[in-house]
Image (cartoon, helix red, strand yellow):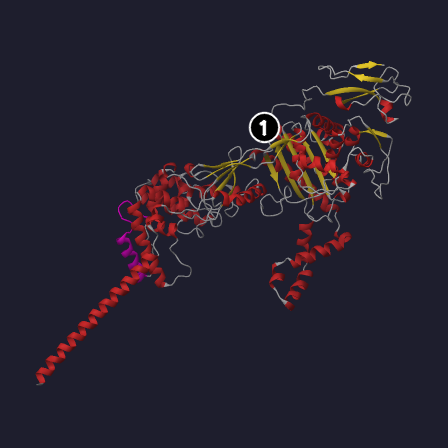
Amino acid sequence: MAKKKSRSKKIQNKQTAYVIGVGALFIFLLLGYLFYRHIVSGLPSLDQLENPKQSLASSVISIDNEIIGQYYRENRREISIDSIPSFVVDALISTEDRKFYDHWGVDLGRFIKAMFKTVFLGKKEGASTITQQLAKNLYDLKVARENLFQTGVRKIREWFTAIQIEQTYTKREILEMYLNNSFFGNRAYGIEMATQNYFGKSAKDLTLPEAAVFIGLLKSHVYYNPIRRPENALQRRNVVLYNMVDNGKLSEEEYDSLKNVPLNLTAENLNDGMQSSIAPHFVEYVRKQLESMADKYGYNLYEDGLKIYTTIHSKMQKIANKAATDHLAEYQKLFDKYWNWSSNKSTLDDLVDKAIKNNKSYLEARGEERKKVYRKLKNSSSFIDSVKTIAQTIEVGFVCLDVTNGEIRAMIGGKNQDFSYGLNHATQTRRQPGSAFKPIVYTAALDNGLYPAYPIINQEFNYNGWNPHNFDNSTGGFMTLRDGLKNSENLISARLIIEGHVELWQIDRLAHKLGIKSKLDLVPSISLGTSEVTLLELTSAYATLADKGIFNEPISILKIEDKDGILIDQFSHSSREALSAETSFLITDMLETVINEGTGVRTRSIHKFYRPAAGKTGTTQDYADAWFMGYTPQLAAGVWVGFDDRRVSFTGKYGQGSQAANPIWSNFMREVYNQMDFPFESFTIPENGNITTVKFCRESIYQYGNPRLYSNDCSSGELIDFINLKDIPDPFVKGKDNKVNLYTKFYKPDSLSHEAVEIEE
């Protein structure tokens, strides 16, 4: 009986053990399956393996094929492994994975060896193959703040992914992807971008010591950073070179000759990994346009590796940068010498108040803490000094356009040419152009039938409470439009409106036809440039005058291609007739006089630019804004110089457009024409024969304000000037000036002499 019970108990125990065993096995298999599913769920899909998504920088390219800027999340540019020197691969394999060509993604022997050293010897050693590192780089398998379990899961996933990569790609393709995806510090992803950042050239031009620097960076882009830790980088580079010796890829003699070679980093690229653009404000200007088009074309500007071909000419841009930088460095010293904050205390108090209220510490504080922050900053001399420095910094805007098509050749948006996210003073700020707007008023007058020799009395007036005066408070007798524009006389420009020669709506219409998009204040003082415009708008208007009255919409982007060079879109030029060629020629000829004899004469006398050119200075009240606008037959350029706060202004005549802005324009033009291959061109008379020259009797203009044609009994001599045939005056009123013979009929001018044939009554 006892035996039966014992046997029954044994059977029961076996059954229990069996059930427990099966249950344990089931749980183990279930946990294994769940763990496997957990592992697999984090693996890249087949499509991701075959088409890995790489974030590529989009490049902004100048018209002369220079990269002038980039947009990116990861600053990466791809290069084919066939273009990379073979010693780059030799250095990589010798240092990172000597069994690369023998394993199938995972090196088990190396892994076991590394585990042994880590566990038993306390020496941490990496065991990841190149393929495993690629898996980590491509598919971002790491999670933030991972624990030991998560680290183990990630390593297993890297194993699986590495094996799948080896099954999908050739060894050479794996090496190419690895070199194009590795991070080399200083915001550079991929060996091509790293080479550009550190050495200022393409990876295809790398030397062996330079290549060894990059392979050394793979271990730690911080500790071996050649910019911040050159000694560490040099030591690590030589370790890489000796690894090549140890792996049979370099001789001892070659190593000895290379180990003392200096790093030879390119100085201009030592800006914390940011490749500074020569035209940062232009690149930002283009970015805003590209972002507005992204939905239409379905691209990601920061990841798709686009090629954006633009109108900027890198050489012209560099010339513009130098002209502005050199002039502002000198002018800042001059301004700082004369500016006195003691005389502008209320302005300073207001600027400090605004700066405090925009300060991060103030904005983050609340209640009493905010008041404490305010008092602290208000009493901080260093904070106040920084406000002063920013407020009294002279700013600049510059634009150059090709007059034949509106393409932007150069753009400066501010004094700080390394900073792209501040105000663009060429496109974003509207300021009063002062006398630089007068040519538009004069052009409207010419379009209405007046002509360069037309006389206006240079006397003050009171028009509904408005009583302007000339810059120097001078007055005088009659003055021609040409002389009025040449000397920038305010009274002549103002009288064109109050005497009814030009209506305000005509100025508005013409300005917008010429390229001004800003809403204008249609009051008589617009004749003196009191209505605000942007620099790009006004430059576009001057370019229209230069191109015989044809308005060309300013354009910055020529075409966009994807990373494979497939065209996404090509942008066409937009142009229309805004003004007759005859009127355009007359105002241009008058503006030539400004540069040759008038307020713009420093272009010739001091800055030595002698090509045919037309232009106009501009200075606003209290010297707040200085302008110079001008053009040649090929290029139109505009310059604005001033301050972000209008209450800060130049303190004397050195703030006139002829002194503060003209040097930048003149030096730019001189150097462009000296350094670049522009043919000699003059402004030409329209071929239709409508423009002629007429001999006027001088005294009939300057004494009587009633133009008469010259004759032998005109004792004061002759005044010769251009006129449009249609604008030759009706028969002169007899008896008003009996010293001059009267003429009533004009034949078409002789095509060679361009002089009117006179027929006596």
Q: Position of residue 307 (x, y in %)?
A: 48, 39
Confirm whether the magenta stretch covers residue 413.
no
Q: Amino acid at mark 1?
A: Met
Give the residue displayed 22% in from the left and 70% down from the top: 23
- Determine the image quadrant of residue 335: top right
Give the residue displayed 28% in from the left and 51% down from the top: 107
Quick one: label 1, few (<14), some, or many (20+) residues within 10 Å?
Answer: few
The answer to which of 731 and 459 lies nearer the viewer is 731
Mark 1 lies on residue: 676
Q: Is residue 699 visible?
A: yes
Q: Is residue 98 visible?
A: no
- Determine the image quadrant of residue 482: top right
Q: Position of residue 528 (x, y in %)?
A: 77, 39
Q: Position of residue 160 (x, y in %)?
A: 30, 53
In the image, taking residue 176 as reference, residue 13 lies left or right, namely: left
Please give the range of residues in magenta.
97-121
Residue 509 vertical placement versus 394 (above, below): above
Helix, strand or loop status at disc 1 = loop
